[in-house]
């Protein structure tokens, strides 16, 4: 029995890979594989958390947000389409984190003006913003987006329920904008 235990330890040490090698392997996997891989060991859990760059948040996890961003240190993309809490408060809390977001999806909500302003005061890295299927999009919303995220390269404001006419201020306010999704905005150019 003792010899078998020693043999297992020897095999385990022969199969050991340094963390940077595991990171390279994990980066080739999809997000569904990361979830099952993170169950294997604590070490793989920490490595998969570090490798994750995007996440979809559905529940109002505001009380746990500080620990959440310590767990996922390399997040660059947040999807809040399923989030059912106070979006302004949530974005304000995100602004106090060390995360450097590049992409933010707040579709199916109203434009979170206060949350955008709080986020913009601390984070100048957002280059992609998705605001599709919003209740309404007006000139003040677009002005707020342009003021908060002046470095936007991609903007999706498709299929709003209500849109004001004469809201075509985007080319002037966002000079780096190169991709805009205006699908379903029938009054946009009136």
Image (cartoon, rainbow, N blue to C red):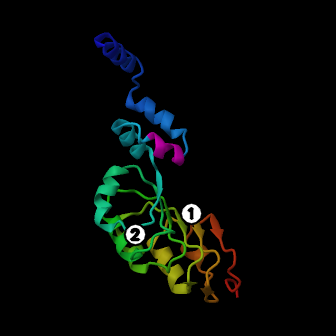
Query: Which one is in front, 62 or 110?
Result: 62
Name the dominant secondary structure of the magenta segment.
helix
Instruction: Tell me if residue 33 is in the magenta stretch.
Output: yes
| Residue situated furthest front in the rendering | 1
Q: Magenta segment range? A: 31-37
Instruction: Tell me if residue 7 is in the magenta stretch.
Output: no
Quarter holding residue 94: bottom left
Tell me what residue is drawn at x 41 percent, y 67 percent.
59
- Disc 1 from disc 2: Cα separation: 15 Å
Q: Label 1 belongs to which residue?
A: 153
Tell me what residue is drawn at x 61 percent, y 86 percent.
163
Query: Which one is in front, 140 or 176?
Result: 140
Q: Which comes before the other along the chain, label 1 or label 2? A: 2
Q: Label 2 belongs to which residue?
A: 120
Query: Which one is in front, 55 or 180?
Result: 55
Residue 12 lies, in percent from the top left, at 38, 21
Q: Residues within 10 Å of mark 2 (few under 14, many from 20)?
A: many
Tell me how many marks there are: 2
Quarter holding residue 139: bottom right
């Amino acid at each position: 029995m003792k010899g078998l235990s020693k043999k297992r330890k020897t095999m385990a040490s022969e199969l050991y890979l340094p963390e940077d090698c595991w990171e390279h392997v994990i980066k080739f996997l999809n997000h569904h594989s990361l979830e099952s891989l993170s169950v294997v060991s604590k070490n793989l859990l920490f490595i998969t958390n570090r490798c994750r760059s995007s996440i979809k948040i559905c529940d109002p996890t505001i009380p746990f947000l500080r620990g959440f961003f310590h767990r996922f240190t390399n997040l660059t993309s947040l999807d809040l389409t399923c989030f059912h809490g106070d979006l302004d408060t949530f974005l304000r809390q995100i602004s106090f984190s060390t995360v450097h977001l590049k992409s933010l999806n707040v579709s199916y909500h109203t434009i979170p003006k206060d949350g955008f302003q709080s986020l913009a005061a601390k984070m100048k890295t957002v280059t992609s913003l998705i605001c599709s299927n919003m209740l309404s999009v007006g000139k003040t919303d677009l002005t707020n987006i342009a003021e908060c995220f002046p470095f936007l390269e991609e903007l999706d404001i498709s299929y709003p329920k209500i849109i004001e006419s004469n809201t075509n201020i985007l080319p002037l306010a966002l000079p780096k904008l190169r991709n805009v999704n205006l699908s379903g905005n029938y009054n946009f150019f009136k």
